[in-house]
Structures are given as structure tokens and as C-alpha cells.
Image (cartoon, rainbow, N blue to C red):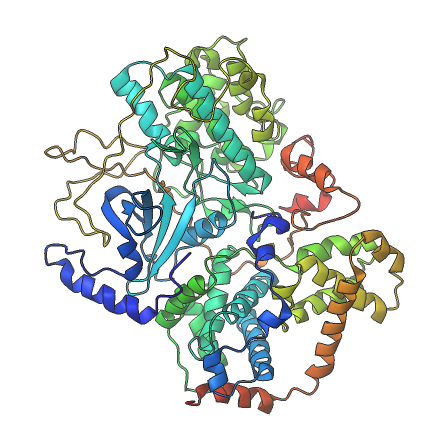
Amino acid sequence: MGDNNNTNRGLVSANAAANSNRNNNGSHHKKPEWLQQYDLIGKIGEGTYGLVFLAKIKPPSPSRGKSIAIKKFKQSKDGDGVSPTAIREIMLLREITHENVVKLVNVHINHTDMSLYLAFDYAEHDLYEIIRHHRDKANHPLNQYTVKSLLWQLLNGLNYLHSNWIIHRDLKPSNILVMGEGEEQGLVKIADFGLARIYQAPLKPLSENGVVVTIWYRAPELLLGAKHYTSAVDMWAVGCIFAELLTLKPLFQGQEVKGNPNPFQLDQLDKIFKVLGHPTVEKWPTLANLPHWQQDLQHIQGHKYDTAGLFNVVHLSPKSPAYDLLSKMLEYDPRKRITAAQALEHEYFRLEPLPGYNALVPIQPGEKVINYPTRPVDTTTDFEGTTSLQPPQTASGNAVNMQGAHAVAGRSVPRPMIGVGMPRMPPQGMGPYNLASQAGMGMNPGGIPMQRGVSAQAHQQQQLRRKDPGMGMPGYPPQQKQQRRY
Amino acid sequence: MAANFWTSSHYKQLMDQEEVDVVQSLDKDRGITLEDFKLIKMHMANYILKLAQHVKVRQRVIATAITYMRRVYTRKSMTEYDPRLVTPACLHLASKAEESTVQARLLVFYLKKIQSDDKHKYEIKHILEMEMKILEALDYYLVVFHPYRALSQLLPDAGLNDISMTQLTWGLVNDTYKMDLILVHPPYLIALACIYIASVLREKDTTAWFEELHVDMNVVKNISIEILDFYENHRMITEERILSALNKLSMKP
């Protein structure tokens, strides 16, 4: 990985030349050495942190012709070097390997402009596009096999992350990729780890990273200001995505109040309560401790809701296994919410049609194979991000559909959040001091081989199960009392 | 994986002492000996600590920064990667990796405050450039495990979690970063060696406890001897000795 054999000097001169040529018709002849192993196809996404490009590996590489998504991080605006988002993403993806997690194949640095490039295996589809295709073009729902296979693989990847103490924190349809034609066709890949965190022994409360998770998929405990949230926030998002796969509409489409550092989003909570009813302290005991629950009594507690009923909204029989699973994912109390490991064992996945490896091609004969559209590529943008004929873009809202309205003369325009996914909400600046958390040293046993006491196997199970509702910290082994301080 | 040491990049990257003790040829050309090499790294570890105390970061950030620095010099020469610049850059990168970002401008501010000589005035821009070079030199592996977590678990298990033992072992672990142990041994073994030394010093009988652990006591004892040897040698290290090693670096070969 990397270009350790490239000298810095080589890159500098090559790139200076590229820069000087740029105004000359966007010439790509002089590129940094590492860039020359790729053929740039075009831009496929854009976000707060930079741009995403589609490229193909050139010969003589044995993987020539293979498609690669390259995420370019701009130098952080605060003039503080590599953005913490990029660091977080690199550091996690460098450690993890799973078939349902996007694969980081290379990291490149352009020392001249201090930009950083992450190269991923390219996935042609994502759940945002697949859902949109069914809603707007195909006009029929996803078949049951596809829904179940997508969900199972998503949970399988998430179970891997959670058992490694990683919370994704930004799950949404556009971050769930699906491989197109090829060996891995129909395989789900969880992408965009820009907000992901190792929560085993954080030096600060997780909430200090700022509010995370796109509002529609945000768990109620986050909306109510929980400081010590857990992997259960990802399961809430999975529940929302599951419902969206069934109905082709986002389940809770709240209006986001922007520019508000406060995580409290009244409209989003309102949308949730309308479907699931009012949460109660009886059902969710720690609710009373959440800051915004206490502070906003008249708004959220005063309103009475006529519950529409989740089963009505998603058109499922309340007795169906699918509904049972969904309602367990959308459990208000994060400690009671189903875990990824438990969800994988749910009856829903043991009933026909059984989930499969290739979610896009049903095994049953006679089922129609849907040809999902390929990702739009903007071929007018080069790696420097220079655009020759870039149509105007509006980067706003949750997964706002960028198709159609802005398309110019047959040239498709990339959506703001696709490809390897770009988180919309940057973590808020972290101060240099962390005296407040000086006392909280990590005490989890994850990395330590303890040959007595807790056996490795028992420990594994503790990581996967959540059976200690008294701790306020789901996901943690019950007997480790010290962990309460997180 | 990020949480299991045995599947982590840290475990896979553990090296033999002989591999760590290789002086890069560019440095050799300047007359740097293995002893110089070790001294400069120790001096840098102390410098990181000093800088970190000014910007107030947790011990784990310091430990990660020192580990990065030591890893860098298993691959890169001090001639090309100036220790005076690698030090703040490692701390900057480690602070981001450990979610306690310290701004580069703050590091520069304190660098200038600490530094007595005017020869090596480094600015924010230099730190940020070096940060990227370090990221590259580390081959983008940033997750580092430390003995502290093991220590805070093992001590109560051994019934040694009184303040005096905690402070002693914690201090011993801190001092292990003046050596290359973190590149060579799994962190929990380093923690055990520190507990072993502390229990001998304080005359606590931990024999039965160690036996029950089913760890290779030879390894634990060897690490302990290394630490004790270091303390023994450390007394002979003078400021002049370190300065002369550093001066070799600034000489033309």
C-alpha cells in the first residue's frame, strides 16, 4: 500500500507540471506516478470532505480493467492537516476485513497539495439508487428475496463491526453499497467510515464528536441528547432502512433544523412518535435521564399521538416474522433494541425465501432479474476537482435526488452522497484539552488475552449479546462494572 | 481488527529486536552508532512527553505518538526524517488517531517555547507536511495497543491495586516507552513484566498468581531484565552524550 518507493521530490515535480498544464485543456499527461496506474473515468460523488471518482486500473497490473472508487480528501479547512475524518476512516479500514464491508485497496498522498486519496473496490449500486429505481422507474416493490438478502448481509457486516467495538454512526441507504456485475455481484458492502468510532475505550464521550447520523435514520436516544450512545444507534438505522426497502419511502422523514448544534430535532421525533407512539418511562426507564426529554416537556410530552401503527405504515401483518424483526429494531429503549447478532438469528431469516449471497439475482426460476441503472458519472471533472462544464448543484437535504432537474444535455450529474459515501455532518471541532475525561481509562478486556477468569469464547458471547439492562451500557460485558464511566 | 489484539495490525507488525536495531545506512554514513540511535529515540520520547505535558494530552496519546516515532525509524533515516520535526508531527497525528486533536499551531507555539536553539525553527506547514510523510511511512496503520489497559485489569486481578502499586507499575510502563519494547512485545506482556518488577521491588509474593496466568514466564522475565538493564544504563547517560549523537545528524557525511 502507498507509494513508499516514490520519493517526495518525484511527486512534487510531476504534480507541479500537472498543475501548470491544468488550464491547458485539463491535460492528464503529467500526473503523479501513483495516479498513472489508473484511468480516470469521472466524478461520481461529492461531499463535505472532498470528491469521489471512478477510475479503472490500467495494464500491466494483474487487476487491469478493474473499477476503483477513489475518494479524495481535501486538506482540512481549519489548516490542521489531514482531517480527523480521513484519519478515522483509514485507521479503521486498515484493521478490518469482511465481505460485507467496503475494501480499502490503497491509500495515496499527493504531497504537493497535501491531498489524500483512498482507493476502494468499486460498487456499482447502493440502496439509495436501488430503492429509487423501484419507486420512480420500476413502480413495483423489491422482491422478498432481495430485501431479505440485503438486510441479512447488512446485519452480517454490522455484526462484524460491532463485535470489533466499532459503531458506524452514519448508516443510511446511500452508504450501503451493492456490488454490480462480477464475482461479487449482489454483495452488500457497508461504506463510509468517516464517522465510525472504536468505542472500546474512548478518551472522550462519543457525543463530543458532534451529532452524527443523518436525521432520518437517527435513533431517538440521539435526538434526545444521549451522551453515551452505543452500537444500538446503528440498529435503529437498520430498522429504518429495512422499512424503506419494504415501502420504498423513508420511514421517518423529519425536517431538519440546520445550523443547530443541539441534537434535538423536534420534527424528527414527531415523525417517529406518530408511527410508534409516545415513548414512556415505563418502557424506557433511562428516558427520564435524557437531557432533551427533561428540557422539552411541553413540546414532546404534551402532544398526544394517535398512533398510526408501524404495521400499517409498512403494510405487514403484525404477526409476520418480518414485522416482528422490524419492531425489535425500532425498539425505543436502546438496551432492549435487538442486536445485529440476535437479528441474524431471527426467524425471519430462517423462512423461505432464504437470504442469499447475490442479493440481486433471485435463485427461484421465473423471477425477473432487474437491471439496475449504473451510477451516473460526471466525466467533466478531473482529479484536481476542476470542472469544465459543471452544472449547478444543490447539496442539501437528506439524500436529495439530484437526477433530472439539473441534468444537462444527456450528461448525468452525480448525487451529493454516493459511491464510497460522504458523510454530511462533519464532527465538530475537538478541543485540545481533555481534562474532563482524564479519569476514564479503558478497562475493557477486548485486546487482552486473559487465560483465566473470562474465557475467550465466553467473552465473545458477551460482546455479541446484550443481557444486562441494569448498566445503561448495552453491548458491554455485564460483569465489567468499571465500564460504567463511559 | 480494531479491538482484538491478536488480529490487529499491531500484532502482525511486531518485530524482532534485531530488526528494530538496524541503523539506516544514511544515518550510518553520518557516524550514527546503534547506541546513538537508541539514545536519540529515547531523547525524542522524552521530548514528546515534554511537549505533551504543555498541550495537556492523555498518556495514551503520548504512548501512541512515541510508538509512531519508533515505527517510523525502523523504515526511515533520521537524516531524512529530522527528529526535531518528527516529534511534533507524531504527536499531532497521534492526537487525531486517539480522538483528542491538538492543533498544529499549538504544538508550534510550545515547540518555540521549549526550544533553546534557533537552528531549527519549524512552522505549522512543516509539521503538516511531516504528518503526511509519517502517515505514509507507517503504511497507514494507526491503531496501537498499549500496556495500560492490560495493567488496569491485571492489577486488581492480582490483588495489587493499591495506590502505591498502581503508581509504581504505571510509572514503569511509562518508562518502557524510552525503549523499543512496544515494537517487539505484545503490550500485555510488557504490563506483566512491570507488575513482576514492582512486586519484586515491593516484596509482594505474586508467584502463585503468575503461575495461574499460564504465560511464558521466561518472556516476562526477559522483558523485566531488559527494563532493569535500561534503568542501570540510564544512569550513565549524560546530556553531552545525547547532544553529541544529535550533532552527528547535523554533520555532512
Residue B4 in the image: state x and y as whole percent: 62, 47
Can residue A432 be seen here? The reply is no
Q: In this image, A234 relative to A387: left or right? A: right
Residue A49 in the image: state x and y as whole percent: 33, 49
Q: In this image, A53 relative to A380: left or right? A: right
Image point (33%, 48%), residue name = A71
In the rendered view, would you say B73 is above or below A170?
A: below
Q: In this image, A164 relative to A88: left or right? A: right
Residue A391 in the image: state x and y as whole percent: 15, 40
Residue toward you, A57 or B146: A57
Residue toward you, A56 or A119: A56
Image point (41%, 86%), residue name = B119
**Total tally of numbered discs in the picture:** 0
Can residue A210 be seen here? The reply is yes
Q: Quadrant of residue A268?
A: top left
In the rendered view, would you say B41 is above or below A141?
A: below
